């Protein structure tokens, strides 16, 4: 009846719960709405990743020639 203290539910159970949540969302909002929201989220994620890489590329790199040995 009761789970042992410290035992965790299987990952597969949580994946099934997530799949059911997505199915309920699609049924409630419609396929087109869900696809548009996913496309928008992908655009935002790609823009953020591109901006991060661009910032990393243009940031000044510390030069090892300027270091002095003690």
Image: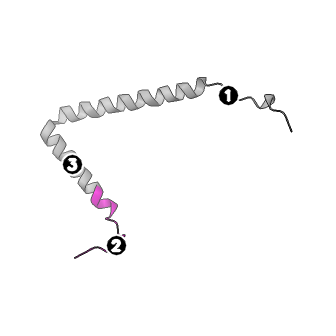
- Looking at the image, how many numbered discs can be counted on the residues? 3
Provide the secondary structure element on which disc 3 rests: helix
| Mark earlier in primary sequence (2, 1) | 2
Dominant SS of magenta comes to: loop
Residue linked to disc 2: 5
Residue in the foreground of this view, choosing between 44 and 5: 5
Residue linked to disc 1: 61
| Mark earlier in primary sequence (3, 2) | 2
Q: Residue furthest left?
A: 28
Left or right of residue 43, residue 54 in this image: right
- Residue occupying image coordinates x 42% and y 26%: 47
| Mark earlier in primary sequence (3, 1) | 3
Q: Label 3: few (<14), some or many (≥20) within 10 Å?
A: few
Residue in the foreground of this view, choosing between 60 and 28: 60
Q: Is residue 21 above or below residue 13?
A: above
Question: Residue 48, image x and y in percent?
Answer: 44, 29
Q: Point out the frontmost of discs 3 and 2.
A: 2
Cα separation, mark 3 vs mark 2, equals 28 Å
Q: Label 1: few (<14), some or many (≥20) within 10 Å?
A: few
Give the image quarter of residue 25: top left
Find the magenta span and give its range.
Answer: 1-14
Residue linked to disc 3: 21
Question: Residue 53, image x and y in percent?
Answer: 53, 29
């Amino acid at each position: 009846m009761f789970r042992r203290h410290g035992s965790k539910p299987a990952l597969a159970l949580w994946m099934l719960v997530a799949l059911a949540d997505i199915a309920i969302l699609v049924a409630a909002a419609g396929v087109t709405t869900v696809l548009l929201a996913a496309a928008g989220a992908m655009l935002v994620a790609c823009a953020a990743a591109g901006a991060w890489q661009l910032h990393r590329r243009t940031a000044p790199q510390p030069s090892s020639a300027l270091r002095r040995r003690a």
